[in-house]
Amino acid sequence: MGLSDTIKYMEDTKIIEIIKNSTPAVISIVITKDLPKIEGFYQMPYQGRKFLIPKINKKEKEEVKIGGGSGFLVSADGIILTNSHVVHDTKAEYTAFLDHEEKTKHEVEVIARDPIHDIAICKIKGNNLPYLELGDSTTLQLGESVIAVGNALGEFSNTVSLGIISGLSRFIKAQQGGRGYAERLRGLIQTDAAINPGNSGGPLINMEGKVVGINTAVVFGAQNIGFSIPVNQARIDIEEVKQYGRIRMPFLGVRYIIISEDMQKQNKLPVDHGALIMREALGDTAVVRGSSADKVGLKEFDIILEADGKEITRENTLQDLIQEHKMGDKIKIKVLRDKKEKEMEIELEEKSK
């Protein structure tokens, strides 16, 4: 055996050992919901064609599997990390399956959700459970080898793929949780390790066997482009839960639309950037009553041009700037109202549930 063969053998042995030690701590999450019972189907003719329509019995309900995802244990007493979008439905039930226990069911308790970073902290009952150690995502380097593990397509548990770190600090818009709109995710790890639907919430593991990311999204129509949330953000969320029993997030209290050049032209707005405060739908409020924004007198149709001296754009949104702060921080904002600019100082408060 030559030197190159020996090196390859050692690398393969190391990868196999990491996978062997890691997969027992990776779980499959099954999402179920009580829905009206379907009692057969009937045909409905329309424009010369026949469509099958379900017969729904609204008086009876049955448990239906509506999705699945992945997660992984980070403590021996059953603390789990996954994506917020995997467990976003508060009316659904979540069940964890540990592969090493031959499909023993565990009821999942969702402790806290961080939708801004797409992280959720959950819990199952148990002791002496296998778990993964968290690494340091700030030390990642381009080209570094990583392993993605998850419940691919919601069917194939502990699917393993090998790749490298392809990019750092990526920004994407991702369709999350089937809710019909895109979430902005920043600071992501890009990898060419295969990530498929159902892998969401699974770990991205380095060659030390430590978790450096939480797999969250894949770009459809492209090959070998997947994204993971840096695990250091999850560390912050876990500490928040330990100290406060929840994930605390700074909150301004406005609904807004980011202005672009096209939007300015179409609506004859006075500026081509900024956050235009306005409600998203009938019944909404543009400024949340009692919030920080309400206390300083922000109004619907005000345009927040800057925060912390930084111009608000599609690439640098108001939310992005707020997330750089903590509760209690005071920030200066520049507001355009009735064609006049004014500066305000506003104190960020905790977002209520």
Image (tube, rainbow, N blue to C red):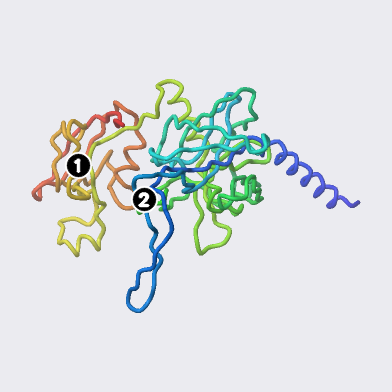
Looking at marks 2 and 1 on the same chain, the residue that comes earlier in the sequence is marked by: 2
Choose between 151 and 141: the one closer to the eye. Answer: 151
The answer to the question of whether label 2 and label 1 lie on touching residues, with beta carbons closer than 8 A, is no
For this view, does 175 lie left or right of residue 276? right
Q: CA distance from mark 2 to mark 1?
A: 55 Å
Q: Residues within 10 Å of mark 2 (few under 14, many from 20)?
A: few
Residue 57: x and y, percent? 36, 50
Choose between 270 and 297: the one closer to the eye. Answer: 297
Q: Indicate which disc residue 2 carries.
A: none
Residue 125: x and y, percent? 55, 26
Vertical order, 245 against 316 (above or below): above
Residue 69: x and y, percent? 52, 45
- Where is the C terminus found, in terms of image quarters? top left
**Which residue lies under the disc numbered 1?**
334
Vertical order, 85 against 330 (above or below): below
Q: Residue at x 35, y 79 (%)?
A: 48
**Which residue lies under the disc numbered 2?**
57
Vertical order, 5 against 235 (above or below): below
Q: Residue at x 62, y 30 (%)?
A: 131
Residue 194: x and y, percent? 60, 54
Q: Secondary structure at mark 2?
A: strand
**Residue type marked 2:** Asn
Choose between 13 and 307: the one closer to the eye. Answer: 13
**Residue type marked 1:** Lys
Q: Secondary structure at mark 1?
A: strand
Vertical order, 61 against 345 (above or below): below
Kindly tell me whether residue 96 is visible in this rendering: yes
